[in-house]
Amino acid sequence: MVKIKQISIFSENKPGRLRKITKVLAEEGVNILAINIASSDGFGVIRFIVDKSAQAFQKLKQKGFTVSLNEVLAIELVDKPGGLFEVSSILARKRINIENAYVLILGSRKKAFLIVDVQDIEKAKKLLKNENLHFFTAQKKFKRTFG
Amino acid sequence: MYWEQEIETLHRRSLEALQLKRLQQTVRLAHKNIPFYQKKFTELGTTPRDIVSLKDLQKLPFTSREDLRANYPFGMLAVPPEEVVRLHTSSGTTGKPKAIFFSKKDINQAAELIARCLIMTGTTKGDVLQNMMTYGLFTGALVMHYGAEKVGVLVIPAGPGNTQRQIALMQDFKSTTLHVTPSYALYLASVMHNEGIHPKRALSLRRAYLGSEPYSEETRNKIERFFGIDVYNSYGLSEMNGPGVAFECLEKNGMHLWEDSFILEIIDPETGVSVSDGEKGELVLTTLRREAMPILRYRTRDIVTIIPGRCRCGRTHRRISRIIGRSDDMIIIRGVNIFPQQIERILMGIKAVAQNYQIVLEAYDQMTVRVEISKDLFDGRVEHLVNLKNEITEKLRSEILVRPKVELLEPGTLPVSEGKSTRVIDKRTL
């Protein structure tokens, strides 16, 4: 299984914050594959899946952002009705709680992955090991950059 | 180690006799040469001859900072203007500044008091003092500078700011001692931390003198731990020479106030009456040795208590606590008296909180506490941030009895002050 890393950035909830963050990523030549924003009154956490996560993390940190890096699950979603139902049924059966989730789409809608952020990633990976799930696997294009 | 052992350890009775003698001289000088005091004495029906014991202090008029402003620029001088060699001013947030004059003798005496403070805390010839206070009209840096030179210390007049240069100076000249505001010390720590500079390895620091802003014991501990040094609390105000009025000894338990040079009183700021021993109240100071500008019963606005008992260091001069608050910083919200320092103490006790905070007061007594979160403890989880926010709100509520609105901010959002902290923004209109 390829390790997918998620970058989380603390941000005050005010205009221009996302611009400031994405400017850093753009200048660094980092490609954003998925984004998710969660906000609670007054502040938010912006999350990204990018192609060069380690490099993006270092740069953001260096620029003074409050940032963290953690591994998430990337489970393939079958592009048909009930696709998410199937995946979530397995997660429910294994009693894996979803802290946060969003979708990553690759190759112009050819493949979609559910990004699942969980408390204990190692435990979750172990629990899901023998399930009929397809995880993100190294593709040629991303081989160098993921992991 | 003492600079002037005899006077520093003088028996209380002899010290009080000395105080009375000097008080009488000061009162005569002020009465004779300062029209402002003449008028006050007449109003109160007091003459210098009425001062026959220290208890008679209560017969003397108070001096407020408004009095100093009203008599700006030369009104409080007790000597002809050509006798003064230095001017400092203390700026207020509103209106005219206060002018503080020093004669040659006054400068020397202020330096002597600093020399006592330095020797008391182990700084001596061979030490290198990096003075990060503001040089200029503010007394903080210059008074310390003169005192340190008197002791034979190498002084680096760095002034505040320019953090990269500060770090380079500390490294190149092996500074052992810092004179710095607490907020700048914290800022310096955060910069060094971010750059991966380990003060214990890279620097030769042994101690720091922190003053000019109130700060908490937690802040002291934080700075001591980070730099691996001893931090000593320093108290002074421009109206009373600047630094060197009261200073901690190696015991770090309250600041010895040099009672041969100042008479201290603790009063209730509302009534002006002395509080009972050990109770908190406003510090009132009378100069005993100043010739250019003697000041009687100056209302410092600083809230302190006297630390009871003798100090183990052997000095007989009484100790005052760190500043609990400023009588005019006191915030009244929904009828509750709050000092910003209470809020600081709570915030500094919470790990995930960084150094900077701000208190904003708005219409209808709405209080918002804006808090920078710690970069190192951020793990990306929204619920942890929500929990942190709730924890801060609850802890503040139980301390100040008012539930504030808490805002979490990115580190580095709030301004770092170089002089006095401006932590409270009051947008309420009366």
Image (cartoon, coloured by chain):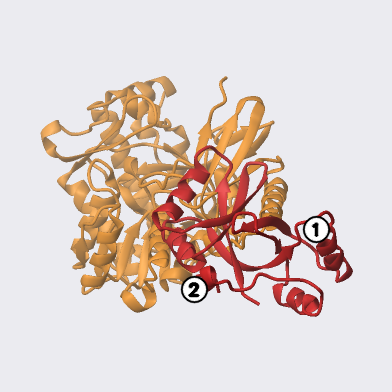
Chain colours: A red, B orange
Q: Quadrant of the C terminus of chain B?
A: top right
Q: Quadrant of the N terminus of chain B?
A: bottom left
According to the picture, the residue beneath numbered tag 1 turns out to be: A84
Looking at the rendered structure, the secondary structure element under dot 2 is: loop
Between residues B243 and A88, which one lies in front from this camera angle? Answer: A88
Residue B362 against residue B217 in the figure, above or below: above
- Residue B226 is labelled as none
How far across and down, in percent of the image, does residue B238 sit? 32, 42
Marks 1 and 2 sit apart, C-alpha to C-alpha, by 29 Å
Between residues A129 and B69, which one lies in front from this camera angle? Answer: A129
Looking at the rendered structure, the secondary structure element under dot 1 is: helix
The picture quadrant where one finds residue B3 is: bottom left
Q: Alpha-carbon neighbours of circle 1 within 10 Å: few (<14), some, or many (≥20)?
A: some
From the viewer's perspective, is B49 left or right of B393? left
Name the chain letter of the residue that bears numbered label 1: A
How far across and down, in percent of the image, does residue B65 sit? 39, 31
Name the chain letter of the residue that bears numbered label 2: A
Residue B282 against residue B150 in the figure, above or below: above
How far across and down, in percent of the image, does residue B111 sit? 24, 55
Look at the image and tell me whether residue A35 can be seen: yes
Query: Which residue is rendered at x = 47% and y = 58% of the image?
Result: B319
Amino acid beneath label 1: Leu
Among all residues in the image, which is located at the extreme right?
A93
Residue B256 against residue B78 in the figure, above or below: below
Query: Which residue is rendered at x = 27% and y = 68% of the image?
Result: B170
Co-location on one chain, circles 1 and 2: yes
Amino acid beneath label 2: Arg
The picture quadrant where one finds residue B39 is: top left
- Residue A144 is labelled as 2
Q: How many marks?
A: 2
